[in-house]
Image (cartoon, rainbow, N blue to C red):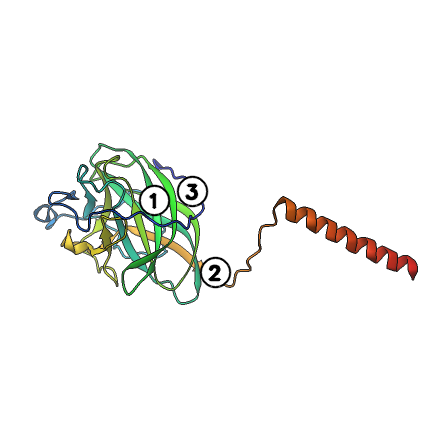
Amino acid sequence: MRFAVTTALALLLPFASGALAAPPEGAVASLVTPAQAAGAPGLVSRAAGCVGGLQHDDGTVENGYSFNEGFGIADLAFWAERFDPGAEPYLFSRVCVCLTGQGQSSAAPITIAFFADDGGQPGAVIARVPAQATGIPVFPETAFFDVPLQVRVEGPVWVAVNWNVDLTPGVFLCADENGAGSPVPGVTTVDGGATWEPLTAYWPAARALFIRAEARAAGSVLEVPTLGIAGLVALGLLLGLLAFSLLRRHRAA
């Protein structure tokens, strides 16, 4: 396969918000115009990702979405899909994103972000995981990039993808424009998550994004604190004293 990813632990860090609440005129980009898409067969990604997991797309790519460089958006753009594995705690173990492009950038640092659901739109940041997408194909070829991770959530969550549209121009997120669509419509932002808009505000034919995930019931998790060197020394002394005390009692008996 012509792709590679790097993984990292989820970081509980906020995103910086920018001044843009909506993309400037000319900033919205798509690979296929509505006229071109009409009647055209959907494309099948050469490497399916997260098969059997959580997904809203129908498996065929009709378009690709992005924002053009030079409009001040840079790394503030996110595209998000809402997933609801259930009320119990769930552990997300993998996110799969389908990307394509125009040839300017064959590789791009990307970020997978998790947002809590806030009344039907992304709210507080739960986690973000950086990765590297390498070997992004030129449209009409598309490919999935799998990002292993460990993110525990409860209830609905928004899973988003982000990259710097100025530093890696010509990268597009695969889009489904003729499927059943997402139960809750996907959203996008150009100000780092300060405000969100439905995909259809900029791409009217949007039905779902090619963002997929794998998750399983997490169950209860026992939090074990990290002792550190000082803690380990103290624990060793405590165990030594306990052993000495037991030995004295044994001899006295």
Residue 218 disc label: 2
Q: Where 137 sits versus 115, above or below?
A: above
Q: Residues within 10 Å of mark 2 (few under 14, many from 20)?
A: some
Q: Nearer the viewer, residue 116 or 92?
A: 116
Q: Which residue appears at 47% of the width and 60% of the height?
A: 218
| Residue 139 x %, y % | 20, 38
- Can residue 142 be seen in the rendering of this structure? no
Of tags 1 and 3, which is closer to the observer? 1
Classify mark 2: helix, strand or loop: loop
Q: Which residue appears at 18% of the width and 47% of the height?
A: 63
Q: Earlier in the sequence, mark 3 or mark 2?
A: 3
Q: Quadrant of residue 171?
A: top left
Classify mark 1: helix, strand or loop: strand
Q: Earlier in the sequence, mark 1 or mark 2?
A: 1
Marks 1,2: beta carbons within 8 A: no
In the picture of the structure, the residue carrying the numbered disc 1 is 111
Residue 7 disc label: 3
Q: Quadrant of residue 4?
A: top left
